[in-house]
């Protein structure tokens, strides 16, 4: 079974993000980059599927300039078999990303595409859904459990939805996006890092894919969230309820 | 000619180990220190990182990854940043595997290394130190006398980590031609493992006294060749760990000083504290550069005894100064066991005694 996993390069959630003074973006000096944590979870799930079946191929795909190779190497060190880097140096919105991925899927023909539910940089949460629509494939977003059928022709996915869990099933090929509780990704191992050296990273130019990358979304400006003000101390429960009702207007 | 940028693979190894140290070692460190019990599951988790198996040559069932001392020092710094006790336990197999990889005969490699490539954590250990005043690595009192094609070992060793569970022990002793190392299975007769020692720091690492009483071992147990490169490698690894402990203390004290307010400003804004923090940062970087230079020289294959000794001496003094300053910056809080800095001070104190005094 061939599984395609998408990998986005994002700032390390451990680093402090600072917005540029002119609001045009974030300060990128001294920022460490990692694989989007949700993509890492998707990759872990793909590796577990392959290990359970004892056969198959896990292919990574990322879009960006050559620095993205770092994240692809990390994914290969975790155990993916090979990687595709779609070379592109322009900013892309979710639809453009989905259109590029659709071309890669057509070319690779995976039975399953595993993606993070969203990237932690822009939190768009759209590429997976858009890709499913473009391909006309079934989708299961916010997955917290994935069970492959014995004949490998279908999956059952438990989704984290408002108010509980929902289990849906569909025939493959399809798209699954991972939620936080799907699994705990493994660490790359020293032997894995050494083996990754020999694994292939195929480079494809985005411009050669004949995908419509024209932007539909422009970012006008970014601003940091307002500083949280110090809380208020109240003497009585009545006073608290009064404030929640009159001032905060939440009850 | 000069460059301090790790290559892509070294960077990935360092990032992975740093993440492991932050997510797995740090949260366990306090409890392990308080209880004196090593959390065994973390040894298995660390084993799966393949730090030990990865350096064993392919011919002996390993992965044959490079065993660069520079990469090793990056790993040691990050693990020790997480916790020194846990790091020493996790890396204990290398006390056996590295010397065997470096000096072992084909038979020794085949026999010993095969024990360290399995799916489960396997402890190893080395018996270096001796319980006497003025211990000197080059003047061991444990002796190895040749007798009828055998060696007869006599002496007492101390601070032998994990001796009770190690599959193999590497015992350093004085033979006819100077200091040599001997491989002993743990169940060797006339080898007595004493009570677990009670140490000032490193409370989660079980260390033992060891007695060798006319302990007879076959001649083939000796590692052949110059033992100095093994010591140098170990000095560099320990120094890198000292850098890791010091960095942990420095970062904690720095963040504390930015938060803690006195007289209307953060104490980090006070010159007395700011100068202290700057001094700590300088000392750590200086020690790291000595470590990296020694490691680099080891990797060139040249004799690195001088550089390794300089690094060890400097790092052992540095870690004490930096961790002590960290305790000072936290003020009264630094002395309380709820904050980790006093643990780093206690653990860091050990570097001046491990494998011989700081000045050796």
Image: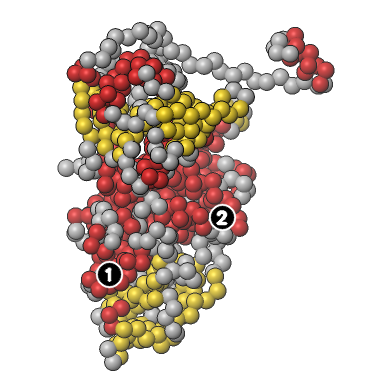
Q: Quadrant of the C terminus of chain A?
A: top right
| Image x and y of residue A139, in percent | 43, 24
User: Is B276 above or below relative to B62?
Assistant: above
Q: Which mark is residue B32?
A: 2
Q: Which residue is mark 1?
A: B110
| Residue at the spot 56% in from the left edge and 24% down from the top edge | A161
Residue A156 visible from this viewpoint: yes
| Residue at the spot 31% in from the left edge and 50% down from the top edge | A191
Q: Is residue B194 left or right of residue A100?
A: right
| Residue at the spot 41% in from the left edge and 67% down from the top edge | B125
| Image x and y of residue A66, in percent | 24, 28
Q: Which label lies toward us, 1 or 2? A: 1
Viewer-side residue, A150 vs B325: A150
Same chain shared by disc 1 and disc 2: yes
- Judging from the image, the colouring scheme is secondary structure
Viewer-side residue, A46 vs B127: A46
Pointer 2 chain: B
Outermost residue on the left side: it is B1
Outermost residue on the front side: it is A151
| Residue at the spot 55% in from the left edge and 74% down from the top edge | B195
Viewer-side residue, A180 vs A9: A180
User: Is B176 above or below relative to B249?
Assistant: below
Q: Which mark is residue B87?
A: none
| Image x and y of residue B186, in percent | 43, 75
């Amino acid at each position: 079974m061939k599984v395609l996993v998408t990998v986005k390069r994002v700032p390390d959630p451990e680093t402090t993000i600072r917005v540029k003074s002119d609001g045009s973006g974030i300060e990128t000096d001294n920022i460490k980059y990692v694989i989007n944590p949700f993509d890492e979870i998707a990759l872990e799930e793909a590796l577990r599927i392959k290990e359970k079946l004892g056969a198959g191929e896990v292919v990574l795909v990322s879009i960006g300039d050559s620095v993205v190779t770092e994240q692809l190497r990390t994914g290969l060190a975790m155990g993916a078999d090979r990687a595709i880097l779609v070379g592109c140096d322009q900013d892309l919105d979710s639809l453009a990303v989905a259109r590029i991925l659709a071309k890669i899927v057509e070319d690779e023909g995976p039975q399953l595409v595993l993606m993070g539910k969203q990237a932690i940089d822009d939190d768009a949460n759209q590429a997976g859904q858009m890709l499913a629509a473009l391909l006309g494939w079934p989708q299961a977003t916010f997955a917290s459990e994935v069970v492959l059928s014995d004949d490998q022709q279908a999956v059952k996915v438990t989704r984290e939805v408002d108010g509980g869990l929902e289990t849906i099933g569909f025939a493959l090929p399809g798209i699954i996006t991972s939620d936080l509780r799907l699994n705990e990704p493994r660490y790359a191992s020293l032997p894995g890092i050494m083996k990754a050296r020999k694994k292939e990273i195929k480079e494809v130019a985005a411009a050669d894919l004949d995908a419509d990358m024209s932007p539909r979304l422009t970012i006008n400006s970014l601003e940091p969230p307002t500083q949280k003000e110090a809380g208020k101390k109240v003497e009585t429960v009545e006073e608290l309820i009064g404030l929640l009702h009159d001032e905060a207007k939440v009850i | 000619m000069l460059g301090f940028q790790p290559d892509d693979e070294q960077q990935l190894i360092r990032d992975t180990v740093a993440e492991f140290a932050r997510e797995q070692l740090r949260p366990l460190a306090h409890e392990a220190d308080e209880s004196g019990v090593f959390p065994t599951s973390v040894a298995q988790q660390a084993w799966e990182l393949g730090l030990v198996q990865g350096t064993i040559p392919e011919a002996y069932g390993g992965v044959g990854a490079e065993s660069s001392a520079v990469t090793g020092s990056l790993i040691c710094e990050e693990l020790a940043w997480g916790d020194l006790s846990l790091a020493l336990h996790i890396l204990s197999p290398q006390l056996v595997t590295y010397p065997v990889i470096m000096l072992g005969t084909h038979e020794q490699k085949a026999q010993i290394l095969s024990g360290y490539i399995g799916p489960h954590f396997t402890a190893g250990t080395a018996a270096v130190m001796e319980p006497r005043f003025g211990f000197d690595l080059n003047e061991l009192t444990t002796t190895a006398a040749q007798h009828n094609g055998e060696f007869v070992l006599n002496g007492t060793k101390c601070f032998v980590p994990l001796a009770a569970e190690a599959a193999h022990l590497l015992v350093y002793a004085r033979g006819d031609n100077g200091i040599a190392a001997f491989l002993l299975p743990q169940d060797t007769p006339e080898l007595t493992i004493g009570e677990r020692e009670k140490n000032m720091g490193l409370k989660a690492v079980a260390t033992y006294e060891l007695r060798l009483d006319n302990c007879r071992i076959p001649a083939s147990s000796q590692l052949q060749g110059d033992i100095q490169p093994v010591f140098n490698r170990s000095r560099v690894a320990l120094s890198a760990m000292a850098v890791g402990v010091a960095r942990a203390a420095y970062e904690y004290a720095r963040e504390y000083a930015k938060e803690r307010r006195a007289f209307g400003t953060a104490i980090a804004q006070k010159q007395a504290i700011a100068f202290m923090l700057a001094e700590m940062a300088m000392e750590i970087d200086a020690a790291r550069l000595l470590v990296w230079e020694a490691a680099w020289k080891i990797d060139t294959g040249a004799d690195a005894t001088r550089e390794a000794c300089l690094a060890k001496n400097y790092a052992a003094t540095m870690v004490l100064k930096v961790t002590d300053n960290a305790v000072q910056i936290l003020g009264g809080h630094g002395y309380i066991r709820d904050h980790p800095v006093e643990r780093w001070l206690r653990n860091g104190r050990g570097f001046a005694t491990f494998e011989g005094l700081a000045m050796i």
